[in-house]
Image (spheres, rainbow, N blue to C red):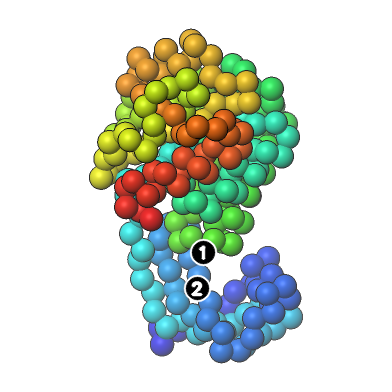
Amino acid sequence: MVGEVVLGGAEGRHAATVRRLREGERVDLTDGAGRVAECTVAAVAKDALRLSVHRVYEVPAPEPRIVVVQGLPKGERGELAVEMMTEAGVDVIVPWAAARCVTQWKAERGAKALARWRATAREAGKQSRRFHLPQVTELATTAGVAGLLAGASAAVVLHEEAETPLSGLPMPDKGDIVLVVGPEGGITPEELDRFRASGAVAALLGPTVLRTSTAGLAAAAVLSSRTGRW
């Protein structure tokens, strides 16, 4: 045994009162960046657990990284998109203020929306037992997205008029795959031209048109399968 640690605070209360973990059950603690402590419950208090740590190890980050640029969806669909992409293993989620976004993140409203996205990613990461939690970046402009695409190992824009299927594109072994998902109103011709000028390829996800909140999940599944992450 490596030692003991007390899990308190919100996590300890949740484990003790909601999950109702009991002595002898296994618990894995992680810092969200790949470091894991394999533990068992030694004792349970009202709002905390005392854990016996058996070993500590590192889980390598998956390669290549999957970065999804998500055009801001309406209402709670943004949080749904973040939840599903986190469960599917997306590494970085970039909220994007596209020209046709109905939702606008401005001032305090934007800060609160970003906080909800980050909280959703954290909770979904714990639920799906990820040792590398996804990063949710600050809101990106179209210029910022173009910069991400220019530096990617593979740059893709989902577009319903594209002829090349996403499943048929060559994929790198390392680096970043940056994938752009447009908002409900779609990507403007000007945005598409700018992204193509930055090295992106337009690709078709499938024969049906998905909502912006589900397209990232479906695309992440395709990319994970193509790259051997799944």
Which residue corresponds to the image point at 58% horizontal and 34% vertical from the top-left? Answer: 210
Q: Is residue 145 visible?
A: no
Nearest to the observer: residue 183 or residue 59: 183
Could you tell me which quadrant the N terminus lies in? Answer: bottom left
Q: Nearer the viewer, mark 1 or mark 2?
A: 1
Which residue corresponds to the image point at 40% horizontal and 60% vertical from the top-left? Answer: 34
Q: Is residue 203 visible?
A: yes
Disc 2, SS = strand
Marks 1 and 2, how far apart in space?
A: 9 Å
Nearest to the observer: residue 215 or residue 196: 215
**Type of residue at label 1?**
Arg
Asked if marks 1 and 2 touch (Cβ < 8 Å), the reply is: yes
Nearest to the observer: residue 63 or residue 33: 63
- The x, y position of residue 169, in whole percent, is 31, 34
- The quadrant in which residue 214 appears is top right
Q: Is residue 224 above or below residue 194?
A: below
Check disc 2: other Cα within 10 Å, few if <14, some if 14-19, many if 20+: some
Which residue corresponds to the image point at 34% horizontal and 46% vertical from the top-left? Answer: 226
Residue reaching furthest to the top: 190
104 vs 61, left or right, is: right
Q: Is residue 2 above or below residue 12?
A: below
Which residue corresponds to the image point at 56% horizontal and 89% vertical from the top-left? Answer: 24
Could you tell me which quadrant the C terminus lies in? Answer: bottom left
The residue where tag 1 is placed is 129
Disc 1, SS = loop
- The quadrant in which residue 38 appears is bottom left
- The x, y position of residue 68, in whole percent, is 47, 37
**Type of residue at label 2?**
Asp
**Count of numbered circles on the image:** 2
64 vs 35, left or right, is: left
Query: Which numbered marker is on residue 28?
Result: 2
